[in-house]
Amino acid sequence: MTGPASSTARVVELPATAAAAGVARRELAATPGLAGELGYRALLLASELIAVFVEEPRPGELLRLTISVTPERVRIDVAGEEPDASTSALLHSHEPPSLGGYGLQIVDRMADAWGTHRNGAAHMWFELLR
């Protein structure tokens, strides 16, 4: 019987505030297998997904960051309370970045795959091929 591909997966709880992106970047920077261009893209795209969840800070609530690294890909999943704006609205926003625009457009252009789903919480994820 063949086992699953070797992988590193971690789950990190983040405050649902502006501090979340900085904490996530430190966690990602310390993740084995994330370096160079791949690491830079993972940091940027994770920050953009987190920004969707903390557009309206929710002190006392948590986000869950799941970091999965396999020989084939890196997958980052951010889960939390449903964002105020819909994915479609965010994807087609023309607002300046400081007002919540462009984030998902960056994810859409730079990720090899991305999406959303609900599993108790709202999830936004992306994958980068290695």
Image (tube, rainbow, N blue to C red):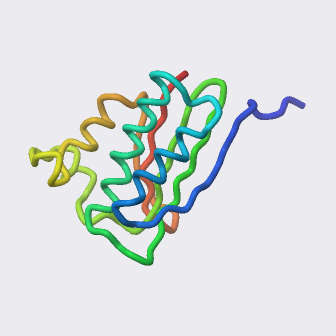
- Depth check: 27 or 77 in front? 27
Where the N terminus falls, by quadrant? top right
The answer to whether residue 100 is left or right of residue 115 is: left
* Near-viewer residue (93 or 99): 99
Please name the residue shown 59% across and 40% down the image. Answer: 30
x then y, percent, for residue 15: 45, 66
Q: Is residue 56 above or below residue 60?
A: above
Residue in the image at 21% along x and 50% along y: 90
Quadrant of the snapshot with the C terminus? top right
36 relative to 44 in the view: left or right: right
Residue 58 drawn at (x, y percent)? 35, 73
Residue 87 picture location, percent across and down? 27, 52
Question: Which residue occupies the extreme right position in the image?
Answer: 1
The residue at the point 41 percent across, 30 percent down is 41
41 relative to 81, above or below: above
- Name the residue: 83% across, 33% down: 3
Instruction: Please indicate whether residue 100 sits to the left or right of residue 63 in the image.
Output: left
The percent coordinates of residue 29 (x first, y second) are 53, 38
**Residue 15 sits above or below residue 47 on the image:** below
Q: How many numbered markers are drawn? A: 0
